[in-house]
Image (cartoon, rainbow, N blue to C red):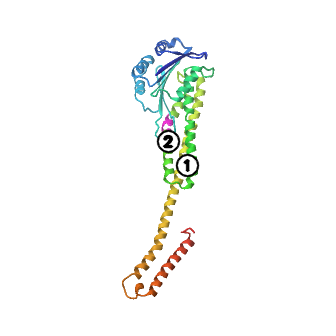
């Protein structure tokens, strides 16, 4: 699905234009520097991508990236435009793949291309664009800034959710929940690894936009891109802190599991130690010889008394050592 909107640099509300008219406008875009066009392509068909390629004069490598997904976040400058690959996560689920967003930025045009029909950051930025605004910066680079701002800020609730999960798991760690909580921590760590893998190169992309002036980004807009760069840098640092917290919670839970196993082994050892002398006594007095318990009631009473005394002495000794709780 493709939609396009055209606006004046004066800040007047944009107007929707048909895709065919947008392509015609691109042919004479240099004659209209006071206007700005945004083309949004959600799940475009092959013929629509071909039309974009011709209208923007895209480099073959850009066309290849638009066609083949699973790209790393990157920023590439071509004659006439900047090409960006960005990622956005919709949830903190470790099995969820990031949404891949491609942006083409020119002097007075912006194009966004993605596989889904709609993704949240683009929708928020698009509706803000259609409402019109008088905020700086204006122009195509200003709309790219607002799109990046929505995309980066959209990760904050996800990181907050992960942090709350880890805090809950750290509180539950003292309750000896064992393997169930360990699997939950592993799931959270997998989510953090997936998000970190996507945001690490994206941080470099936004940092590159904020550090140097391209021909398509004005000096005035650099300050705004630096603000977005600061946001994603703080998110990256938060991910590193959460990874350390997840590692700490994992170590605590593994220590608790080991402690439980030691308790089981201790109880089994105590039981074996108590049963061992009883086995000896019953085996010795149960041998088929004359004058053994079943051949004399006195010896039988002695054998039974010895079993009780040995068991009682061992239990008292284990309790004094603290090996058996009272």
Q: Is residue 319 or residue 208 the one in the foreground?
A: 319
User: Residue lying furthest left in this view?
Assistant: 288
Q: At 48% from the left edge and 49% from the top edge, which residue is drawn?
A: 183
Check disc 1 and report its element: helix, strand or loop.
helix
Pointer 2: what residue? 191
In x, y percent, where is residue 186? 48, 47
Q: In 3D space, how far apart are the residues under numbered discs 2 and 1 (Cα atoms)?
A: 15 Å
* Residue 80 magenta: no
Residue under the point 47% across and 37% down: 96
Report if residue 199 lies within the magenta region.
yes
Q: Give coordinates of residue 131: x percent, y percent.
A: 59, 20
Asked if one can make out residue 241 in the rendered structure from this viewpoint, the answer is no
Point out the residue furthest to the right here: 134
Q: Is 320 rendered above or below residue 89?
A: below
Q: Residue at x 53, y 26 (%)?
A: 123
Which quarter shows the C terminus? bottom right
Q: Which range of residues does the magenta coloring cover?
A: 195-201
Name the residue beneath numbered marker 1.
Answer: 169
**Residue 199 to residue 309: above or below:** above
Q: Earlier in the sequence, mark 2 or mark 1?
A: 1
Picture disc at residue 85? none
The image position of residue 253, as x and y in percent, is 52, 53
The residue lying toward the viewer, choosing from 253 and 55, is 253
């Amino acid at each position: 699905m493709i939609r396009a909107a055209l606006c004046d640099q004066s800040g007047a509300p944009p107007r929707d234009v048909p895709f065919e008219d947008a392509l015609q406008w691109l042919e004479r875009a240099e004659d209209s520097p006071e206007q700005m066009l945004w083309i949004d392509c959600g799940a475009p068909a092959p013929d629509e991508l071909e039309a974009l390629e011709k209208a923007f004069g895209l480099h073959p490598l850009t066309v290849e990236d638009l066609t083949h997904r699973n790209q790393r976040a990157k920023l590439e400058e071509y004659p006439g435009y900047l090409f960006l690959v960005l990622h956005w996560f919709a949830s903190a689920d470790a099995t969820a793949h990031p949404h891949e967003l491609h942006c083409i930025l020119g002097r007075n045009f912006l194009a966004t291309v993605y596989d889904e029909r709609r993704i949240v950051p683009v929708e928020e930025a698009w509706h803000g664009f259609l409402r019109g605004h008088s905020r700086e910066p204006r122009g195509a680079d200003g709309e790219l800034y607002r799109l990046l701002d929505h995309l980066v800020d959209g990760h904050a609730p996800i990181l907050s959710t992960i942090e709350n999960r880890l805090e809950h798991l750290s509180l539950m760690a003292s309750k000896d929940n064992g393997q169930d909580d360990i699997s939950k921590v592993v799931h959270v760590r997998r989510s953090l690894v997936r998000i970190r893998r996507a945001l690490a190169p994206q941080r470099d992309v936004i940092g590159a936009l904020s550090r140097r002036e391209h021909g398509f980004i004005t000096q005035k807009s650099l300050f705004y891109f630096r603000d977005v760069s600061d946001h994603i840098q703080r998110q990256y640092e938060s991910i590193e802190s959460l990874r350390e917290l997840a590692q700490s919670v994992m170590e605590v839970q593994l220590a608790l599991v080991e402690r439980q196993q030691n308790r089981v082994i201790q109880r089994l050892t105590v039981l074996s130690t108590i049963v061992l002398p009883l086995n000896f006594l019953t085996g010795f007095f149960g041998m088929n010889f004359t004058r053994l318990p079943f051949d004399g009631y006195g010896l039988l009473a002695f054998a039974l008394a010895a079993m009780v005394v040995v068991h009682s002495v061992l239990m008292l000794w284990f309790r004094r050592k603290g090996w058996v709780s009272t």
